[in-house]
Each structure stands twice: as structure tokens, then as C-alpha cells.
Image (cartoon, rainbow, N blue to C red):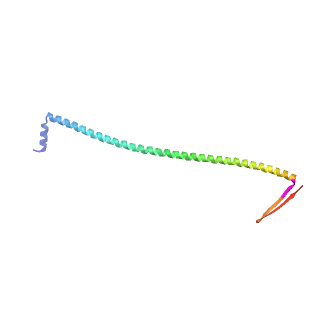
Amino acid sequence: MDIQTVNTALLKETSPVDNEQNVKLEKTAIKIQSWWRGNMVRRMLMHAALGAWAIQCWWRSLQTKMVEQRRCLALRLYTCQEWAVVKVQANVRMWRARRRFLQTRRAVCTIQAHWRGRKNQTRGTLRGHYEVKASQLELDIEIVMT
């Protein structure tokens, strides 16, 4: 007897109990296959979710860095503008103070000149002449009393 004959003989001799067993085995095989496919799908979904999560983390960190760079740039620009404003204000204040000083000095010189002129008119005139030669000072003063 060869194998093919034995297989055909076994197939012909199937009983209703064997059919029930075959159906049960087939259902069990289907359950095992569906369980395995479910595990494979869940594994693929888990890998996809982890990949998406990694990409999202990277993107969030990149956005945070970009926001920080923009904030630093805006801060630098603001401080630069503020510094320029402070410089302009300081220069204007210095100019106004110098102008007031020069105006006051002119007024003082005018008052002193009038005062000295009045003193000279009452006491006499003071004439002088000086020259600086080498390291010597030559000074001639003439006082005329009237």
C-alpha cells in the first residue's frame, strides 16, 4: 500500500465525530490565526504611535528653540533701541546744560566787565601788556590814577 491509497481510504472512512473534530480544529485554528493577526496589528500600531510620538517631541522641542531664539532677538533689538534712546536723551541733556552754562558764563562776564569798568572809572585805569618768550614771562603793567 502506498501513501496515496491510505489517504483516500482515511478520507472515505470519516465519521460524523471526525467531522465535528475537524470543525472544532478549524475554529481553533481560526481563533489562533486571528489572535496572531491582532497581535501583529497592535504591534504595528504601537510602532507607528511611538514613531509619531518621537516626531511630535522633536517638533515641539524645535518650536521651543525657535520661540526662544525669536524672544532673544526681540530682547536684543529692544535693548539696542532703548540704548539708542538713552544716548539721544543724554546728548540732548548735555547740550541743554552746556547751553545754559555758556549763557550763564556770558552773563557773568558781562556783569564782571561792567563791574570792572565801573571800578576803573572810579579809581583809575589799568593797562597791561605781557609776552611769553622761551621760558620767561615779560610783564608790563601801567596804572594811571585820575
Residue nearest the viewer, comparing 65 with 29: 65
Q: Is residue 39 left or right of residue 2?
A: right
Residue drawn where x is 50% and y is 46% of the image: 69
Residue nearest the viewer, comparing 12 with 127: 127
Task: Tell me how many marks there are.
Answer: 0
* Residue 108, percent from left and from top: 77, 49
Farthest left residue?
1
* Residue 8, percent from left and from top: 13, 40
Above or below, 23 relative to 140:
above
Q: Main secondary structure of the magenta part?
A: strand
Residue drawn where x is 66% and y is 48% of the image: 91
Above or below, 100 relative to 27:
below
Q: Is residue 67 left or right of residue 122?
A: left
125 in the magenta segment: yes
Residue drawn where x is 32% and y is 40% of the image: 42
Q: Quadrant of the N terminus?
A: top left
Farthest right residue?
146
51 in the magenta segment: no
Residue drawn where x is 47% and y is 44% of the image: 64
Q: Is residue 143 left or right of residue 63?
A: right
Q: Is residue 17 left or right of residue 62?
A: left
Q: Quadrant of the C terminus?
A: bottom right
* Residue 115, percent from left and from top: 82, 50
The stretch in magenta equals: 123-127
* Residue 80, percent from left and from top: 58, 47
Farthest top residue?
16
